[in-house]
Amino acid sequence: MALPVATPRALPPLLRYVDHNLMQNVSAHNRPPHPNATCPVCFLQWDSSPMVTVAAASSLRTTPKATSVIISTFLPLSPCRHWVHYSCLIWLATQTTSDHKDRCPVCHIQLFEWEGITALTLATRTDLELQDQQKDGFFHPISHVYTPSDRTAYETECTLIDSLIAHFFFAQLNQPSRFVDLSPDLLRPAAKWLSWTTQTGFLLLGMLIAIKMRRFLLEGHKGIVSTESWKEFDEGVKALQKRIMDEVHQP
Ligand SMILES: [Zn+2]
Ligand SMILES: [Zn+2]
């Protein structure tokens, strides 16, 4: 059997790091080497409530529910074994403009690949808010709506996505249904050629959309190939491609 070629340590994506590397290691949780260990983010003893204190210590507008006191899991980071509250680690990841959002708060080793969508997902799950970076303001390139901050940019783009979904949904309502109760297909193209039933199929649909986007750009806007944005797009497509390969070849 061929062994995989050794490559430099690739950092796990944020979600895999939290849900797989940290949270699966349950036997290590809440068992710090010293019973009075403190968290390096909120500076509190590990078995007191960090949710309230993070907000207080950083004077950020996080809004922990006053009625629910959450004592967050205290866990060792991988690979450096420094201890931190789960919610304090997620809070660090919500600091979108910080150079330390993907690093251990003690030794500053980079822990994971940070990405906004994952940080947003984890923050929502942990009842935290993403840091809203106030900028000088700019006009959104697609909607031409003035966006004074990350939050408004996010909300504008969500509105755009919402309108595309609504358009797709109402178009589906006019298609014949394959369900007994005549409900419309959700997230499923009507074309047999585009139908999917597995996660791999869903990723392949994403790949098809990426390929179409690539062709649209290459045919009509060739100048983009020499730009940084193209490089980034291309890397995104390759990452998706890798995801599909992993999906296909995972043991
Ligand atoms: Zn903490
Ligand atoms: Zn560390």
Image: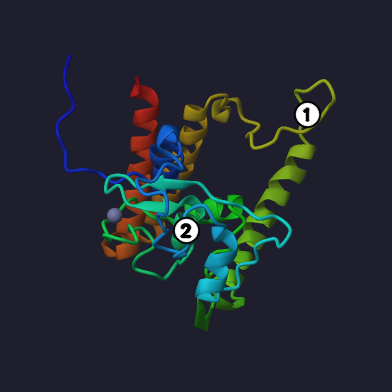
Q: Nearer the viewer, residue 94 or 4?
A: 94
The answer to whether residue 140 is seen in the rendering is no
Q: Identify the mark at residue 167; answer none if there is no mark.
A: none
For residue 104, what is the image quadrant? bottom left
Percent of width and height locating residue 36: 42, 54
For residue 240, what is the image quadrant? top left
Q: Residue at x 30, y 47 (%)?
A: 81
Q: Which quarter of the figure is the C terminus placed in?
A: top left
For residue 146, what is the image quadrant? bottom right
Q: Nearer the viewer, residue 129 or 186?
A: 129
Position of 151 with respect to 183 (left or right) is left
Check disc 2 and report the residue beneath it: 45
Q: Amino acid at mark 2?
A: Gln
Percent of width and height locating residue 142: 55, 68
Q: Compared with residue 151, is residue 21 higher up or lower down, i.e. above or below?
A: above
Percent of width and height locating residue 131: 52, 69
Position of 26 with respect to 6 (left or right) is right
Position of 53 with respect to 35 (left or right) is right
Crowd tier of the residue under label 2, counting other residues whose Cα lies within 10 Å: few below 14, some 14–19, many 20 or above: some
Q: Identify the mark at residue 176; answer none if there is no mark.
A: 1
Q: Residue at x 61, y 30 (%)?
A: 191
- SS for tag 1? loop
Residue lying farthest bottom? 136
Q: Compared with residue 38, is residue 152 higher up or lower down, i.e. above or below?
A: below
Residue lying farthest front? 35
- SS for tag 2? loop
Residue lying farthest right? 181
Q: Compared with residue 203, is residue 87 higher up or lower down, i.e. above or below?
A: below
